[in-house]
Amino acid sequence: MRNLFKIAIRNLIRYKRRTLLTASLITIGVVFVLVFVSISGSFKTMITGQITDSMMGHLQIHRKGYVASIDNLPLNLNMKPKAYQKIKQALAADPQVEAFSPRLKFGGMFSNFTETTNIRLNGIDPEAEFRTVPLFSSRILEGKQTLRKGEILIPALLAKGMKVKPGDPVVIVATNADGSVNGKQFVVAGILESATGPGGRDGYVHIEDAAEVLRMTNAEISEVAIRLKDFGHLTAAVRQLENKMAGEVNQQGRPMFEVHSWENLSPFFNIARMIDVMTLFIRIMLIAIVLISIMNVMIMAVYERIREIGTIAAIGTLPHKIRSMFIIEGFCMGVVGAAVGVGIGAAVIAIVNLIGIRFNFGQQKGLLLKATLDPVDLLVVSVIVIVVAVLASLQPAVKASRMEPIDALRHV
Protein backbone atom coordinates (compact mmCIF):
# COMPACT_ATOMS: atom_id res chain seq x y z
CA MET A 1 0.00 0.00 0.00
CA ARG A 2 2.85 2.40 0.81
CA ASN A 3 4.34 1.81 -2.65
CA LEU A 4 0.97 2.51 -4.27
CA PHE A 5 0.78 5.82 -2.40
CA LYS A 6 4.29 6.71 -3.60
CA ILE A 7 3.43 5.90 -7.21
CA ALA A 8 0.14 7.84 -7.00
CA ILE A 9 1.86 10.93 -5.55
CA ARG A 10 4.60 10.78 -8.21
CA ASN A 11 1.99 10.60 -10.94
CA LEU A 12 0.20 13.63 -9.50
CA ILE A 13 3.47 15.58 -9.31
CA ARG A 14 4.33 14.55 -12.87
CA TYR A 15 1.21 16.32 -14.17
CA LYS A 16 1.63 19.46 -12.09
CA ARG A 17 -0.67 21.82 -14.01
CA ARG A 18 -3.59 19.42 -14.12
CA THR A 19 -3.17 18.44 -10.49
CA LEU A 20 -2.86 22.07 -9.40
CA LEU A 21 -5.94 23.11 -11.39
CA THR A 22 -8.05 20.28 -10.00
CA ALA A 23 -6.89 20.85 -6.42
CA SER A 24 -7.56 24.59 -6.84
CA LEU A 25 -11.13 23.95 -7.98
CA ILE A 26 -11.73 21.69 -5.00
CA THR A 27 -10.14 24.25 -2.65
CA ILE A 28 -12.29 27.10 -4.00
CA GLY A 29 -15.40 24.97 -3.58
CA VAL A 30 -14.48 24.08 0.02
CA VAL A 31 -13.70 27.72 0.87
CA PHE A 32 -16.98 28.93 -0.64
CA VAL A 33 -19.02 26.32 1.22
CA LEU A 34 -17.32 26.91 4.58
CA VAL A 35 -17.65 30.70 4.38
CA PHE A 36 -21.30 30.49 3.34
CA VAL A 37 -22.19 27.87 5.96
CA SER A 38 -20.36 29.82 8.67
CA ILE A 39 -21.91 33.21 7.91
CA SER A 40 -25.43 31.95 7.19
CA GLY A 41 -25.39 29.65 10.21
CA SER A 42 -24.13 32.41 12.49
CA PHE A 43 -26.75 34.80 11.08
CA LYS A 44 -29.53 32.29 11.75
CA THR A 45 -28.27 31.61 15.28
CA MET A 46 -27.93 35.32 16.03
CA ILE A 47 -31.41 36.25 14.80
CA THR A 48 -32.93 33.27 16.58
CA GLY A 49 -31.25 34.50 19.76
CA GLN A 50 -32.60 38.02 19.22
CA ILE A 51 -36.14 36.69 18.82
CA THR A 52 -36.10 34.19 21.68
CA ASP A 53 -34.01 36.22 24.14
CA SER A 54 -35.71 39.58 23.68
CA MET A 55 -39.41 38.73 23.58
CA MET A 56 -40.53 35.16 22.92
CA GLY A 57 -38.57 32.69 25.02
CA HIS A 58 -37.51 29.28 23.73
CA LEU A 59 -40.99 27.80 24.05
CA GLN A 60 -44.39 28.67 25.43
CA ILE A 61 -47.35 26.96 27.08
CA HIS A 62 -50.92 28.10 26.40
CA ARG A 63 -54.38 26.88 27.14
CA LYS A 64 -55.70 24.69 24.32
CA GLY A 65 -57.01 26.87 21.48
CA TYR A 66 -55.41 30.12 22.64
CA VAL A 67 -52.80 30.35 19.86
CA ALA A 68 -55.45 29.83 17.17
CA SER A 69 -57.25 32.94 18.49
CA ILE A 70 -54.20 34.90 19.66
CA ASP A 71 -54.88 37.88 17.37
CA ASN A 72 -57.98 38.62 19.45
CA LEU A 73 -56.18 38.11 22.79
CA PRO A 74 -59.18 36.15 24.15
CA LEU A 75 -59.59 36.52 27.90
CA ASN A 76 -61.90 33.48 28.07
CA LEU A 77 -58.99 31.22 27.05
CA ASN A 78 -56.65 32.25 29.86
CA MET A 79 -55.36 29.71 32.37
CA LYS A 80 -57.04 29.89 35.75
CA PRO A 81 -54.77 30.30 38.80
CA LYS A 82 -55.11 26.63 39.81
CA ALA A 83 -54.19 25.49 36.30
CA TYR A 84 -51.15 27.77 36.25
CA GLN A 85 -49.99 26.39 39.61
CA LYS A 86 -49.82 22.89 38.08
CA ILE A 87 -47.69 24.22 35.24
CA LYS A 88 -45.53 26.18 37.65
CA GLN A 89 -44.83 23.08 39.75
CA ALA A 90 -43.99 21.01 36.65
CA LEU A 91 -41.58 23.65 35.30
CA ALA A 92 -39.92 24.26 38.66
CA ALA A 93 -39.15 20.54 38.92
CA ASP A 94 -37.87 20.24 35.33
CA PRO A 95 -34.03 20.22 35.25
CA GLN A 96 -34.01 21.44 31.62
CA VAL A 97 -35.81 24.70 32.47
CA GLU A 98 -33.65 27.67 33.41
CA ALA A 99 -36.45 30.23 33.90
CA PHE A 100 -40.11 30.80 33.04
CA SER A 101 -42.37 33.84 33.02
CA PRO A 102 -46.19 34.01 33.26
CA ARG A 103 -47.86 36.64 31.07
CA LEU A 104 -51.34 38.10 31.01
CA LYS A 105 -52.07 39.51 27.54
CA PHE A 106 -54.97 41.80 26.69
CA GLY A 107 -55.98 44.58 24.34
CA GLY A 108 -56.80 48.06 25.55
CA MET A 109 -56.97 51.77 24.79
CA PHE A 110 -54.05 54.08 25.51
CA SER A 111 -54.69 57.74 26.27
CA ASN A 112 -52.40 60.68 27.01
CA PHE A 113 -55.47 62.74 28.02
CA THR A 114 -55.64 64.44 24.61
CA GLU A 115 -55.46 61.51 22.17
CA THR A 116 -56.46 57.85 22.34
CA THR A 117 -55.29 54.80 20.41
CA ASN A 118 -55.27 51.04 20.76
CA ILE A 119 -52.44 49.05 22.37
CA ARG A 120 -51.57 45.41 23.06
CA LEU A 121 -50.52 44.92 26.66
CA ASN A 122 -48.53 42.22 28.42
CA GLY A 123 -48.86 41.88 32.15
CA ILE A 124 -45.55 40.44 33.42
CA ASP A 125 -43.62 39.64 36.55
CA PRO A 126 -40.55 41.81 35.76
CA GLU A 127 -38.05 39.67 37.64
CA ALA A 128 -39.21 36.43 35.97
CA GLU A 129 -39.50 38.11 32.56
CA PHE A 130 -35.95 39.51 32.62
CA ARG A 131 -34.58 36.05 33.51
CA THR A 132 -36.58 34.33 30.78
CA VAL A 133 -35.81 36.87 28.02
CA PRO A 134 -32.45 38.39 29.09
CA LEU A 135 -32.25 40.77 26.11
CA PHE A 136 -35.56 42.39 27.00
CA SER A 137 -33.93 45.22 28.95
CA SER A 138 -31.70 46.05 25.95
CA ARG A 139 -34.84 47.05 24.04
CA ILE A 140 -35.56 49.91 26.44
CA LEU A 141 -34.39 53.01 24.57
CA GLU A 142 -35.29 55.66 27.16
CA GLY A 143 -36.23 55.63 30.80
CA LYS A 144 -35.63 53.04 33.51
CA GLN A 145 -34.42 49.48 32.93
CA THR A 146 -37.00 48.22 35.42
CA LEU A 147 -40.78 48.01 35.72
CA ARG A 148 -42.69 48.56 38.95
CA LYS A 149 -46.35 48.55 39.85
CA GLY A 150 -48.11 51.60 38.45
CA GLU A 151 -45.61 51.93 35.59
CA ILE A 152 -45.83 51.05 31.90
CA LEU A 153 -43.34 50.43 29.10
CA ILE A 154 -44.71 51.68 25.79
CA PRO A 155 -43.53 50.96 22.22
CA ALA A 156 -41.41 53.59 20.49
CA LEU A 157 -43.88 54.00 17.62
CA LEU A 158 -46.69 54.82 20.02
CA ALA A 159 -44.53 57.18 22.08
CA LYS A 160 -43.51 59.09 18.96
CA GLY A 161 -47.04 59.29 17.54
CA MET A 162 -48.61 60.36 20.85
CA LYS A 163 -45.65 62.57 21.88
CA VAL A 164 -45.23 60.75 25.17
CA LYS A 165 -41.95 60.54 27.10
CA PRO A 166 -40.77 58.78 30.29
CA GLY A 167 -42.39 60.23 33.40
CA ASP A 168 -45.63 61.25 31.65
CA PRO A 169 -48.97 60.07 33.10
CA VAL A 170 -51.20 58.00 30.80
CA VAL A 171 -54.41 56.02 31.13
CA ILE A 172 -55.13 52.45 30.08
CA VAL A 173 -58.74 51.42 29.50
CA ALA A 174 -59.69 47.78 28.87
CA THR A 175 -62.76 45.57 28.68
CA ASN A 176 -62.71 42.56 30.96
CA ALA A 177 -64.13 39.08 30.37
CA ASP A 178 -67.68 39.97 31.47
CA GLY A 179 -67.82 43.00 29.17
CA SER A 180 -67.40 45.79 31.72
CA VAL A 181 -64.90 48.58 31.14
CA ASN A 182 -62.24 49.67 33.60
CA GLY A 183 -59.35 52.09 33.51
CA LYS A 184 -56.17 52.80 35.45
CA GLN A 185 -53.61 55.57 35.38
CA PHE A 186 -49.94 54.69 34.81
CA VAL A 187 -46.63 56.51 34.63
CA VAL A 188 -44.47 55.87 31.56
CA ALA A 189 -41.34 54.11 32.84
CA GLY A 190 -39.61 53.71 29.48
CA ILE A 191 -39.80 53.65 25.71
CA LEU A 192 -39.49 50.18 24.26
CA GLU A 193 -37.90 49.29 20.93
CA SER A 194 -39.85 46.74 18.90
CA ALA A 195 -38.11 43.42 18.32
CA THR A 196 -40.02 42.67 15.13
CA GLY A 197 -40.26 45.94 13.20
CA PRO A 198 -41.68 49.46 13.20
CA GLY A 199 -45.26 48.21 13.51
CA GLY A 200 -44.82 46.78 17.02
CA ARG A 201 -47.51 47.98 19.41
CA ASP A 202 -46.84 45.86 22.49
CA GLY A 203 -46.64 47.56 25.87
CA TYR A 204 -45.78 46.05 29.25
CA VAL A 205 -47.26 46.54 32.71
CA HIS A 206 -46.86 44.68 35.99
CA ILE A 207 -49.01 41.54 36.06
CA GLU A 208 -50.78 42.73 39.24
CA ASP A 209 -51.72 45.97 37.48
CA ALA A 210 -53.01 43.96 34.52
CA ALA A 211 -55.20 41.90 36.84
CA GLU A 212 -56.51 45.10 38.44
CA VAL A 213 -57.40 46.66 35.09
CA LEU A 214 -59.23 43.47 34.08
CA ARG A 215 -60.87 43.21 37.53
CA MET A 216 -59.42 39.79 38.28
CA THR A 217 -59.19 38.76 41.93
CA ASN A 218 -56.18 36.58 41.05
CA ALA A 219 -54.26 37.07 37.82
CA GLU A 220 -55.11 34.62 35.09
CA ILE A 221 -52.32 33.61 32.71
CA SER A 222 -52.43 33.86 28.91
CA GLU A 223 -49.09 32.18 28.27
CA VAL A 224 -45.99 30.94 30.04
CA ALA A 225 -42.70 31.75 28.30
CA ILE A 226 -39.88 29.31 29.05
CA ARG A 227 -36.10 29.53 28.74
CA LEU A 228 -34.09 26.30 28.54
CA LYS A 229 -30.62 25.72 29.94
CA ASP A 230 -29.57 24.19 26.60
CA PHE A 231 -31.27 25.54 23.48
CA GLY A 232 -29.92 22.57 21.52
CA HIS A 233 -32.33 20.29 23.42
CA LEU A 234 -35.39 22.28 22.28
CA THR A 235 -37.12 19.46 20.39
CA ALA A 236 -36.64 16.99 23.24
CA ALA A 237 -37.84 19.56 25.79
CA VAL A 238 -41.00 20.28 23.80
CA ARG A 239 -41.75 16.55 23.53
CA GLN A 240 -41.14 16.03 27.24
CA LEU A 241 -43.39 18.95 28.24
CA GLU A 242 -46.11 17.76 25.88
CA ASN A 243 -46.04 14.39 27.61
CA LYS A 244 -46.30 16.08 31.03
CA MET A 245 -49.13 18.37 29.93
CA ALA A 246 -51.03 15.50 28.27
CA GLY A 247 -52.09 14.31 31.70
CA GLU A 248 -54.01 17.54 32.35
CA VAL A 249 -57.46 17.22 30.74
CA ASN A 250 -60.71 19.19 30.89
CA GLN A 251 -64.16 17.87 31.77
CA GLN A 252 -64.56 16.49 28.24
CA GLY A 253 -61.34 14.51 28.61
CA ARG A 254 -59.41 16.70 26.16
CA PRO A 255 -55.94 18.16 26.83
CA MET A 256 -56.08 21.50 28.61
CA PHE A 257 -52.71 22.86 27.47
CA GLU A 258 -50.59 23.03 24.34
CA VAL A 259 -46.83 23.50 24.04
CA HIS A 260 -45.28 25.51 21.22
CA SER A 261 -41.61 26.10 20.46
CA TRP A 262 -40.54 29.48 19.05
CA GLU A 263 -40.47 27.76 15.64
CA ASN A 264 -44.27 27.38 15.72
CA LEU A 265 -44.84 30.98 16.79
CA SER A 266 -42.37 33.09 14.80
CA PRO A 267 -42.52 33.70 11.02
CA PHE A 268 -38.70 33.94 11.02
CA PHE A 269 -38.57 30.16 11.28
CA ASN A 270 -39.57 29.99 7.59
CA ILE A 271 -36.53 32.15 6.76
CA ALA A 272 -34.37 29.87 8.89
CA ARG A 273 -35.62 26.88 6.92
CA MET A 274 -34.79 28.64 3.64
CA ILE A 275 -31.25 29.22 4.93
CA ASP A 276 -30.96 25.49 5.62
CA VAL A 277 -32.22 24.69 2.11
CA MET A 278 -29.69 27.11 0.59
CA THR A 279 -26.93 25.51 2.66
CA LEU A 280 -27.92 22.08 1.34
CA PHE A 281 -27.91 23.43 -2.23
CA ILE A 282 -24.42 24.91 -1.76
CA ARG A 283 -23.16 21.54 -0.49
CA ILE A 284 -24.65 19.84 -3.54
CA MET A 285 -22.76 22.34 -5.71
CA LEU A 286 -19.55 21.41 -3.89
CA ILE A 287 -20.20 17.72 -4.58
CA ALA A 288 -20.74 18.52 -8.27
CA ILE A 289 -17.52 20.55 -8.47
CA VAL A 290 -15.45 17.80 -6.86
CA LEU A 291 -17.12 15.02 -8.85
CA ILE A 292 -16.65 16.68 -12.23
CA SER A 293 -13.11 17.89 -11.50
CA ILE A 294 -11.78 14.56 -10.22
CA MET A 295 -13.55 12.46 -12.82
CA ASN A 296 -12.29 14.69 -15.63
CA VAL A 297 -8.66 14.58 -14.50
CA MET A 298 -8.73 10.83 -13.84
CA ILE A 299 -10.27 10.02 -17.23
CA MET A 300 -7.60 12.14 -18.92
CA ALA A 301 -4.94 10.39 -16.85
CA VAL A 302 -6.18 6.98 -17.97
CA TYR A 303 -6.22 7.92 -21.67
CA GLU A 304 -2.78 9.54 -21.53
CA ARG A 305 -1.21 6.61 -19.66
CA ILE A 306 -2.66 3.68 -21.60
CA ARG A 307 0.76 2.32 -22.63
CA GLU A 308 2.05 2.84 -19.09
CA ILE A 309 -0.94 0.87 -17.75
CA GLY A 310 -0.24 -1.86 -20.30
CA THR A 311 3.40 -2.04 -19.22
CA ILE A 312 2.69 -2.42 -15.50
CA ALA A 313 -0.03 -4.96 -16.28
CA ALA A 314 2.37 -6.93 -18.53
CA ILE A 315 4.97 -7.25 -15.77
CA GLY A 316 2.39 -8.88 -13.49
CA THR A 317 0.66 -6.04 -11.63
CA LEU A 318 -2.76 -7.28 -10.61
CA PRO A 319 -5.90 -5.41 -11.78
CA HIS A 320 -6.98 -4.50 -8.24
CA LYS A 321 -3.62 -2.80 -7.64
CA ILE A 322 -3.95 -0.78 -10.85
CA ARG A 323 -7.45 0.17 -9.74
CA SER A 324 -6.19 1.11 -6.26
CA MET A 325 -3.45 3.31 -7.73
CA PHE A 326 -5.95 5.55 -9.55
CA ILE A 327 -8.33 5.62 -6.58
CA ILE A 328 -5.45 6.70 -4.33
CA GLU A 329 -4.65 9.53 -6.75
CA GLY A 330 -8.23 10.78 -6.45
CA PHE A 331 -8.12 10.33 -2.69
CA CYS A 332 -4.91 12.38 -2.43
CA MET A 333 -6.36 15.24 -4.48
CA GLY A 334 -9.46 15.23 -2.30
CA VAL A 335 -7.41 15.31 0.91
CA VAL A 336 -5.15 18.11 -0.35
CA GLY A 337 -8.09 20.16 -1.66
CA ALA A 338 -10.04 19.71 1.58
CA ALA A 339 -7.05 20.52 3.83
CA VAL A 340 -6.05 23.65 1.91
CA GLY A 341 -9.70 24.71 1.58
CA VAL A 342 -10.27 24.40 5.34
CA GLY A 343 -7.16 26.46 6.06
CA ILE A 344 -8.04 29.23 3.60
CA GLY A 345 -11.69 29.14 4.68
CA ALA A 346 -10.71 29.63 8.33
CA ALA A 347 -8.46 32.54 7.31
CA VAL A 348 -11.25 34.18 5.26
CA ILE A 349 -13.71 33.86 8.16
CA ALA A 350 -11.12 35.37 10.53
CA ILE A 351 -10.70 38.32 8.13
CA VAL A 352 -14.49 38.74 7.87
CA ASN A 353 -14.74 38.87 11.68
CA LEU A 354 -11.85 41.33 11.82
CA ILE A 355 -13.55 43.64 9.32
CA GLY A 356 -16.95 43.15 10.98
CA ILE A 357 -20.34 42.69 9.29
CA ARG A 358 -23.12 44.84 10.74
CA PHE A 359 -26.79 44.64 9.81
CA ASN A 360 -30.20 45.76 11.01
CA PHE A 361 -32.95 43.40 12.06
CA GLY A 362 -36.34 45.01 12.55
CA GLN A 363 -35.70 47.90 14.88
CA GLN A 364 -32.41 46.42 16.11
CA LYS A 365 -29.65 48.55 14.61
CA GLY A 366 -26.00 47.76 14.02
CA LEU A 367 -26.01 44.11 15.08
CA LEU A 368 -22.49 42.70 14.71
CA LEU A 369 -22.31 39.31 13.02
CA LYS A 370 -19.72 36.98 14.53
CA ALA A 371 -19.08 34.16 12.07
CA THR A 372 -17.95 30.90 13.65
CA LEU A 373 -16.78 27.60 12.19
CA ASP A 374 -18.53 24.59 13.64
CA PRO A 375 -16.11 21.61 13.93
CA VAL A 376 -18.95 19.39 12.73
CA ASP A 377 -19.23 21.45 9.53
CA LEU A 378 -15.48 21.18 8.98
CA LEU A 379 -15.65 17.42 9.40
CA VAL A 380 -18.74 17.01 7.20
CA VAL A 381 -17.36 19.15 4.34
CA SER A 382 -13.97 17.40 4.45
CA VAL A 383 -15.53 13.93 4.47
CA ILE A 384 -17.87 14.86 1.60
CA VAL A 385 -14.95 16.10 -0.50
CA ILE A 386 -12.77 13.04 0.13
CA VAL A 387 -15.59 10.51 -0.36
CA VAL A 388 -16.77 12.17 -3.58
CA ALA A 389 -13.16 12.34 -4.83
CA VAL A 390 -12.80 8.58 -4.29
CA LEU A 391 -16.17 7.85 -5.93
CA ALA A 392 -15.25 10.04 -8.92
CA SER A 393 -12.06 8.00 -9.36
CA LEU A 394 -13.86 4.64 -9.44
CA GLN A 395 -15.02 4.61 -13.07
CA PRO A 396 -11.65 5.64 -14.57
CA ALA A 397 -9.88 3.27 -12.16
CA VAL A 398 -12.09 0.33 -13.15
CA LYS A 399 -11.55 1.16 -16.82
CA ALA A 400 -7.76 1.17 -16.34
CA SER A 401 -7.77 -2.15 -14.43
CA ARG A 402 -9.76 -3.91 -17.18
CA MET A 403 -7.39 -3.02 -20.03
CA GLU A 404 -5.78 -5.90 -21.89
CA PRO A 405 -1.97 -5.53 -21.67
CA ILE A 406 -1.40 -6.34 -25.37
CA ASP A 407 -4.01 -3.82 -26.57
CA ALA A 408 -2.65 -1.17 -24.22
CA LEU A 409 0.95 -1.66 -25.38
CA ARG A 410 -0.12 -1.34 -29.02
CA HIS A 411 -1.94 1.95 -28.29
CA VAL A 412 -0.39 4.99 -30.01
Image (cartoon, grey):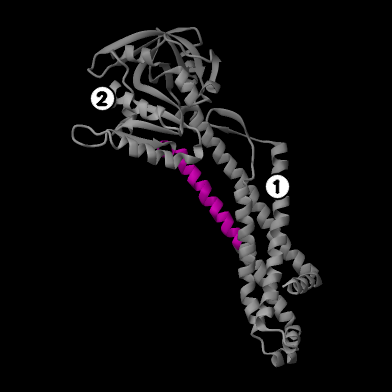
Residue drawn 60% across and 55% down? 380
- Residue 376 position, x and y percent, is 60, 50
**The magenta stretch spans which residues?**
263-287
Query: The residue under label 2 is which amino acid type?
Result: Asn
With 56 as the anchor, is 412 left or right in this view? right
Indicate the position of residue 341 as horizontal and vertical percent values. 70, 55
The answer to whether residue 171 is visible is yes
Identity of the residue furthest to the left in this view:
252
Left or right placement of residue 305 versus residue 168 in this view: right
Left or right of 173 on screen, residue 57? right
The dot on residue 38 is none
Q: Main secondary structure of the magenta part?
A: helix
**Residue 130 place in picture, x, y as percent:** 49, 22
Across and down, in percent, residue 146 comes to 50, 14
Instruction: Determine whether 363 is above or below 118 in the image.
Output: below
Circle 1 Cα neighbour tier, 10 Å, few/some/many (<14 / 14–19 / ≥20):
some
Q: CA distance from mark 1 to mark 2?
A: 55 Å
Can you identify the residue that label 2 sits on? 76
Q: Residue at x 23, y 37 (%)?
A: 254
Q: Earlier in the sequence, mark 1 or mark 2?
A: 2
Name the residue tied to disc 1: 346
Q: What is the quadrant of residue 365 in the picture?
A: top right
Q: Is residue 224 shown left or right of residue 312?
A: left
Q: Is residue 80 visible?
A: no
**Residue 185 colored magenta?**
no
